[in-house]
Image (tube, rainbow, N blue to C red):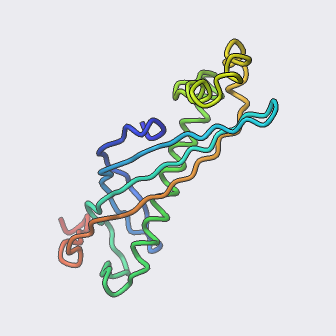
Amino acid sequence: EWIRGKVKIGDILIQNKDKSKISLNIVKAKSRFNPIINGKFISFTVNITAQSNIREIYENKSQNMDFNADPNLIDELSKKQNEVIGERINLAINAAQNRLGADVFGFGETIYRDYPKDWSNIKKRWDNIFPHINIKVNVSSQIKQTGDLSNVITDEEGS
């Protein structure tokens, strides 16, 4: 879903530096494949952009989640979100290349569209080529809405 850019809504769980668990609601995601063909070498860059809202904060131990007092907090959380999304995407790509050995995400279609002459030379061997191509994933995400979290921080034991 992430790779195809079909994630419209969904939740993702990240951990803050103080080990607080934060639930984020993904509200929008887009993906773009960029094939690179250099002679016989084929690689891809997958660029993912995502936007989310903070849904809930669990186990807040030490840090006040006041985004006005700590303007870097949103950037730190966005970086954690990038890492989690990137890990999920890389796991899916590894599964497709190594376990399935099948291009379930349509990388070949992108080559066909962007490099039709090259595709005509490799399409019959694509199932053998795909498991060996290098795929680099870049994730850029933003947390857009935080609400007034200082009043809604929850504690698993107190709820």
Left/right placement of residue 116 relative to residue 4 reads right
Q: Residue furthest right?
A: 39
In which quadrant is the C terminus drawn? bottom left
Q: Residue furthest bottom?
A: 69
Image location (x, y in percent) of residue 54: 29, 63
Residue 156 rendering spot, x and y as whole percentages: 26, 64
Vertical comparison of 43 with 54: above or below: above
Q: Name the quadrant of the N terminus.
A: top left
Give above or below for 63 relative to 41: below
Rendering coords of residue 4 (x, y %): 45, 35
Residue 147 vs 56, above or below: the answer is below
Identity of the residue drawn at 52% across and 57% down: 83
Q: Residue at x 29, y 66 (%)?
A: 57
Q: In this rendering, is residue 126 above or below 156?
A: above
The percent position of residue 103, horizontal first and vertical second, equals 58, 24
Determine whether, in the image, residue 42 is placed left or right of residue 106. right
Residue drawn 60% across the image and 31% down it: 114
- Front-most of residues 149 and 33: 33
- Extreme residue in the top direction: 124
Total labels: the figure holds 0
Q: Is residue 58 left or right of residue 134?
A: left
Q: Which residue is painted at 35% across and 64% down in the image?
A: 143
Q: Toward which corner of the image does residue 70 lie, by quadrant?
A: bottom left
State which quadrant residue 118 falls in. top right
